[in-house]
Amino acid sequence: MTQELEEVKQNVIKCTKCDLCKTRTNAVPGKGNFQSEVIFVGEAPGRNEDKNGEPFVGVAGKKLSIALENAGVSRDDIYITNIVKCRPPNNRVPSTVERNTCQDFLKEEISIIKPKIICVLGNTAFKSILGGSEITKFRGKVVRKNNQLYFLTVHPAATIYNQEFVEVLNNDILKLFQIVKELKNNKKVLIDIEYAP
């Protein structure tokens, strides 16, 4: 299992499929517990992630860590990754081409880890994975698509610019891990949105 993830990681590190490889310092593969019940998926690496080659190590990462701690969860217990594995210049939103070029890496991560639920962080991930928009309208909801459960919430970076989102993120992460607990106990979870197969 870890061997397969290591292969994905190495493929991310040496990837040259799109132009982001020319401007990155480091590609940023996913990181965390390969036995995690949850995969967190963000947008793309920022400056700190590009420098360190690790996801969510900047200010947004700290905000997420705090929300996890509030829910009694350690960063070491989860797996975290991004839609796009290299930093877009000036932290711009990744283009459709960049997202599409990178999507196989995420699919591989998901198929290896087989999470009970995927936590979608912010609009870009929402659009890329589920074709959605306006995450603030749908946050806190559980979505099912192709037998995979997704939980929607704001991107931790949003809490930096809007203090109101701090409570939103904290509450959503608490709800997410309550759902994980129910799934582990084979309880029925309320699906808010069902995508037809």
Image (spheres, grey):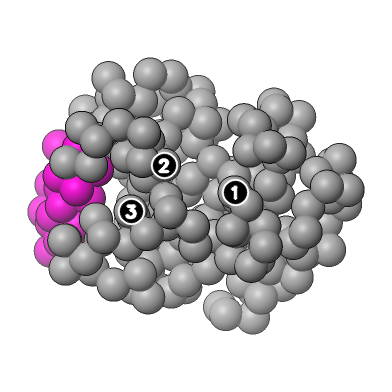
Q: Are marks 3 and 2 in contact (CB under 8 Å)?
A: yes
Q: Residue beneath label 3, please?
A: 63
Q: Residue beneath label 1, please?
A: 46
Q: Residue beneath label 2, please?
A: 157
Label 1's element? loop
**How much space separates mark 3 and mark 2, taking CA atoms?**
8 Å
The picture places residue 119, in percent across and down from the top left corner, at: 36, 47
Q: Report if residue 27 is visible in the image.
A: yes
Density class for disc 1 (Cα within 10 Å; few <14, some 14-19, many ≥20) is many
Q: Residue at x 45, y 28 (%)?
A: 123
Q: Residue at x 16, y 68 (%)?
A: 72
Q: Are marks 1 and 3 in contact (CB under 8 Å)?
A: no
Label 2's element? loop
The picture places residue 24, in percent across and down from the top left corner, at: 78, 52
Query: The N terminus lies in which quarter of the figure?
Result: bottom right
Q: Residue at x 43, y 74 (%)?
A: 33
Q: Earlier in the sequence, mark 1 or mark 2?
A: 1
Label 3's element? helix
**How much space separates mark 1 and mark 3, taking CA atoms?**
14 Å
Q: Earlier in the sequence, mark 3 or mark 2?
A: 3
Q: Residue at x 67, y 57 (%)?
A: 50
